[in-house]
């Protein structure tokens, strides 16, 4: 994806009217008997509805120009592979012989609506249970390869993001010097992240607790929109928070469950802080790139405020310092 394509998609949903959504659903044999409830999604447009068969469904309309059709199909195939292996993941329904549909330029999928709430692990036992589920997912993921999905790399996560932030009119003029005085050395340090030293595999890609639903005792993975290839630790580190010692205990619990299904290369622990930095930088650039989409302005009004950028300067300083700290020590001696 290049920046011009990304920017061109900022206005891509202006034509996605309720009538068009209903007509698209009717084109695959679904007839909404309720209103369309917009769900909490910004990159795409997602609606819940009840059909005339009294079942609840969720329709996901992909942002035009973001992914190629073959990339979306590879996402859907991966999730279906997980579901077939009885790894709890929400797979797109096959309607009229297809999972991915197109209507008047919009590509979309339909899912059964599942119950549940965002998973909130309260203790190490729950993190171990979560690690077990991620291990199950990775056991399936390692059995195949993505061919057209993107990979985790410096260029896409850092280099292109820094270029976007330099173009952004949202960064206050009075803070630009201070912002880039820390972003530039951080991005230069990240250039040497040894990603090439590790085996890449299929990943969820955005595996945080908001993308894991809990219903009774079952944990279900949702939203594989950012699935890509990368080191296994990418699907684990976002579960960590707090001081270094607490993160060590949390990762130990995750891996205790994870290794019931998958072996983990402990050398990947050195990637946690670099990957955290990748995400922080990419997230700022994502908001900047999408700012002309009114949904982003409603959801993230603080992004245009000086206070946000002041906080980011501090966060980037912490990340630069964090790169000099010893990685988590779970008994790995190098």
Image (spheres, rainbow, N blue to C red):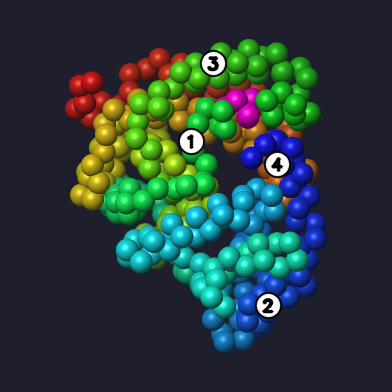
- Mark 2 lies on a secondary structure that is loop
- Mark 4 lies on a secondary structure that is helix
Does 272 appear above or below 257? Answer: above
Instruction: Give the residue displayed 80% in from the left and 60% down from the top.
Output: 15
Task: Looking at the picture, tell me which residue is in the foreground, 203 or 242.
Answer: 203
Does the segment drawn in magenta span residue 216?
no
According to the picture, the residue beneath numbered tag 4 turns out to be 6
Indicate the quadrant where residue 196 lies. top left
Residue 153, position in %: x, y?
50, 31
Label 3 packing within 10 angstroms: few (<14), some (14-19), many (20+)? few
Q: Earlier in the sequence, mark 4 or mark 1?
A: 4
Q: Earlier in the sequence, mark 2 or mark 1?
A: 2
**Tag 4 and tag 1, C-beta contact below 8 Å:** no
According to the picture, the residue beneath numbered tag 3 turns out to be 188
Residue 51, position in %: x, y?
61, 81
Instruction: Give the residue displayed 52% in from the left and 47% down from the top.
Output: 148
Indicate the quadrant where residue 181 lies. top right
Does 150 appear above or below 323? Answer: below
Measured Cα–Cα span from mark 1 to mark 3: 17 Å
Which is the main secondary structure of the residues drawn in magenta? helix
Mark 2 vs mark 3: give the one in front: 2
Segment colored magenta: 158-162
């Amino acid at each position: 994806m290049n920046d011009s394509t990304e920017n061109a998609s900022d206005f891509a949903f202006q034509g996605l009217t309720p009538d068009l959504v209903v007509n698209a659903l009717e084109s695959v044999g679904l007839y909404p008997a309720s209103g369309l409830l917009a769900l909490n999604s910004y990159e795409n447009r997602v609606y819940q509805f009840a059909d005339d068969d009294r079942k609840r469904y969720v329709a996901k309309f992909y942002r035009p120009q973001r992914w190629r059709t073959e990339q979306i199909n590879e996402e859907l195939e991966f999730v279906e592979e997980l579901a077939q292996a009885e790894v709890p993941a929400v797979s797109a329904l096959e309607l009229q012989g297809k999972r991915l549909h197109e209507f008047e330029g919009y590509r979309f999928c339909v899912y059964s609506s599942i119950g549940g709430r965002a998973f909130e692990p309260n203790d190490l036992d729950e993190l171990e249970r979560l690690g077990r589920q991620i291990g199950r997912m990775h056991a399936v993921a390692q059995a195949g390869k993505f061919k057209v999905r993107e990979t985790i790399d410096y260029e896409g996560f850092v280099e292109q993001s820094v270029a976007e932030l330099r173009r952004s009119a949202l960064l206050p003029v009075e803070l630009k010097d201070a912002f880039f005085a820390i972003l530039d050395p951080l991005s230069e340090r990240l250039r040497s992240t040894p990603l090439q030293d590790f085996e890449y595999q299929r990943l969820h890609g955005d595996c945080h607790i908001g993308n894991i639903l809990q219903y009774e005792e079952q944990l279900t993975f949702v939203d594989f929109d950012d699935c890509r290839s990368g080191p296994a630790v990418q699907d684990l580190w976002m579960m960590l928070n707090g001081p270094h010692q607490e993160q060590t205990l949390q990762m130990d619990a995750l891996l205790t469950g994870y290794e019931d299904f998958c072996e983990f290369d402990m050398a990947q622990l050195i990637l946690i802080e670099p990957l955290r930095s990748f995400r922080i930088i990419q997230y700022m650039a994502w908001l900047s790139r999408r700012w002309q989409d009114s949904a982003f302005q409603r959801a993230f009004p603080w992004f245009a405020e000086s206070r946000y950028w002041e906080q980011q300067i501090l966060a980037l300083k912490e990340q630069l310092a964090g790169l000099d700290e010893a990685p988590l020590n779970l008994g790995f001696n190098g």
